[in-house]
Amino acid sequence: MGRSILAVDDLTVNNIGTFAKILDFSRSKNSSNTSFEFTESWVEDCLEVKENCKLGYYDEIAVGLIKTAFINDTTVYIEALSVLPEYLEHGVFEKLVDFAITHAKSNNFQKVAVQTNNPQFESRLIEKGFLAASPDSVENLEARPTETVLILDI
Amino acid sequence: MSSIRSRLRAREDDSFQEALQFLNNKQYKKALKNVDGILKKNPGHTESVALKALLLYHLKEKSEAKVYAKQAAVQGDSKPVTNHILGIYYRSVQDYQEAAIWFQKAVDNKIANFNVYKDLSCLQAQNHKYVGMVKSRLMTLEKEAGYRCNWTGLAIAHHLNKDYDAAVKTLTKFEELAKDSLSEGDLLEHSQLLLYKAIILNEAGEFQASLNALNQDEKSIFDKLKFDELKAKNLIQLGDLKAASLIYRRLLKRNPDNNSYYYLLEICLGTNVASGDVRKRLYQKLASFYPKSDPPKFIPLTFLEGDNFVEAASNYVLEQLRRGIPSAFVNVKPLYKYANKAKALGSIVTEFFNKNHASPTTYVWSGYYLAQHYLALGQLNEALRFANLVIEHTPTLVEPYIVKARVFKHKGEPLDAAKVMDEARRLDLQDKFINSKTTKYYLRANLIDEATRTIKLFHRIDDNVDVIEGLHNTECVWFIIEEAEAFYRIFKEKMALRTDGELDADLQQEILENQGLAYKRFQAIDTIFGVFIDEQFDFHSYCPRKGTPASYIEMIRWADHLYHQPMYTRASVGICKILFNIYKKPEDLNLNGLSKQEKKRREALSISQKSYPDDDDVFGEKAVQELTLDDLNTIYTRLNKEFIQVNEVGFELYCRQYKVIFAAQALIKLSKLTNNKHREIGHFLTKLNFDVLSSDKVPDSLQKVVKITLLKNFPEIKDLLDDRSQMEAYANQKFLSDLTL
């Protein structure tokens, strides 16, 4: 069996620049879950909660990222999910979502939630089993009016 | 009376012996007390004067030590103990020439301590005085023939003295003596010395004898790799190619990635002069034996032509691009010296790049290849286009940024280059390569603070040592030279800012500062190379003792060419240029005249740019003002005259000293090295002919000789020597038509 071409790895103080680059670039190419603009300090704060952040790799090149948060007692919320557009078709997206699901399971959460205004992302998430829901169904969620809320029960 | 004197003498001796004991125990202050006591009663006791010099040196009173050493030298010329102590003193201050003189005097004055011979032989080795070294090693051996290291030491001395026969005889003699008494612990040393003997024989051209020695001692030589390599070398030199080829095949099995084995095997098989087809078949076979090795796939690319080349090159390079090997371009770069091969490779990869890509990374790597391809061909805009394509596709990959930065560098935009490099650095802060690259690019853009801040991220040696000092401690020459050149460029920039009117004190100070710092950094390279030379010293005694003569000889030969390295040349040329353009410190300039802002800047700089602890001349301002043409002469003699730049500064240096024959020789060498295409030669000739030769400092007879020499080498100036304006016209025309070198 050859080595897997896909991988996720930790965020560190040394690759935070790559994290910021993917976030920035994907947003400009409409290849993120949201067009919401994250500030520099938001990026820096990610280092404080490294266990909730991952980079996604394709053939050892970092091409995607995910940042999750425990938003309430039952839900892992995906704050940011970005993949470089040229790599969307190549499995990194799914690999990152899988991380969110495992992350939720291993911490005994029952749901994964995400907001998105990106149709491509929406259909991929639905394919993964996510369902559209009302923003009110997720406690503590800061709902963005132009975005759809999707939830996966696990 | 006489008995009192002799009792006094005896007490003096005791006290002196005690002082020597203290010295051995590093109790310098106690020893100094004894010595001072002796000198109070008997100021003419030169042994004590010499010892005082040595003790003061150890107590860090270096300038005072020097005075006493000189005094002892004058008074104690004929006293062996004084000679010996002076020898030790000069060895401590690392003046090995002077030390050798005093050790030699101690020997000539019949010193009783025979260890002096050992010490002397090491100094002779350091000074390359091999004839004397043989003598001292022989004396050492006579006294202590029971130690193998003394035999080895003598053999090394003979070898360095190119007396191969004597070296081999010395080694053989000990082998015979020790034949039956070698213990298991001696076997490794024995193995190394047997191999060493065979190496000497090979160097002496005694190939058969070398081969015989190897065969005879095969069981005792443990280093089978060196054994096989030397054996095969001997066989080739003896013409027994068949036997040699078998050994190379064995060596290839051991390491199929060693390029040279393939070439040597070809020499044995005679295929190196055969047709491409024959060689192709050979390498196909070798590639099937060693499918994971690169050389059997790459080497055919160097000799195949036409369709054969295209086919082989496609397989080679596209396989690497498919596998995402970042160095794909670098691997084939040696082929770029053939224009047709470069072109073919470009077409192969372009076609591949334009196809559909199943994996996004093959697009990335082939685009990255093409960026480097166009950069190598000097088509900077195309290179930039491909680098940008890749960055736009995968902005998280460091490599395409590096090419992009290099493109900017070649476009003469060092600032943009540094910015791009830094963008790449931010992607991966733990990548030391990109960190160093960024530092270098900042320095190229004269952004010294940014460079220092960047490299600091990788230099946390010690909290008390600042980064510049740390880089000097670790002999980080690439940084030091780049910084030196940056300071020099800033110095030139500031010089250009001067106006004819009253000079601004701040500006003057900045000029002096940058000039001084540039000199200080160039000088640091000289110091570091001096340390490399000095550090050989310990090995003259260590290697014979450890039984590693072959490595020792390798080290000596490496050091022989140390000053010929491009790095040293760059630093020396830098020092020369500073003196040629030196800005002398105006008498009335002082720091009080500086603006507040300038004072603040200077203070910060004096902390951040400190290169040595307790330095009272951080900016090198004093040192550079003391620089003389004589200092340059010392440096210049060491340099490799095969470099164009060296002869450029050599010409200038000799002109300034009116050494017209040397100046003319430098010009002739310059013309030879550049096929007379150096664009400045016309101007140099004008300068030599009209400005230098005409000086009163050049005797008429010499003028004539030089003119004849010039005419012989530059016949084109035959009718111009008496007319400056015509000569200048010729020089200007040559400047425009010739290459920039």
Image (cartoon, grey):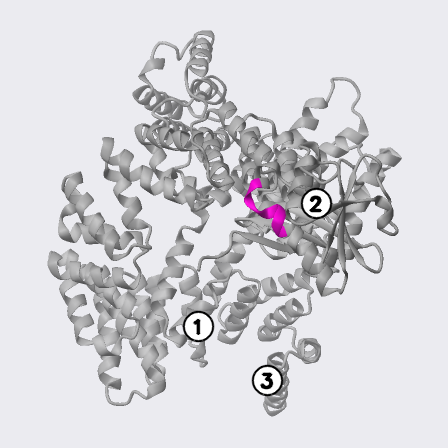
In front here: B353 or B70? B353
Q: Amino acid at mark 2?
A: Leu
Image coords of residue B668 (percent x, y):
36, 27
Image coords of residue A55 (percent x, y):
65, 50
Q: Quadrant of the C terminus of chain A?
A: bottom right
Q: Is residue B466 above or below residue B370?
A: below
Q: Secondary structure at mark 2?
A: strand
Residue found 15% across the figure and 46% down from its top: B271
Q: Which residue is mark 3?
A: B17
Work out whether residue B198 can be spotted.
Answer: yes
Q: Amino acid at mark 1?
A: Tyr
| Marks 2 & 1 on one chain | no
Q: Which residue is mark 2?
A: A81
Q: Quadrant of the N terminus of chain A?
A: bottom left
Q: Secondary structure at mark 1?
A: helix
Q: Is residue A93 magenta?
A: yes
Image coords of residue B556 (percent x, y):
39, 59
Q: Check if mark 2's residue and mark 1's residue have beta carbons within 8 Å.
A: no
Disc 1 chain ID: B
Q: Is residue B324 above or below residue A7?
A: above
Q: Are there few (<14), some (14-19), or many (20+) residues within 10 Å of tag 3?
A: some
Q: Secondary structure at mark 3?
A: helix
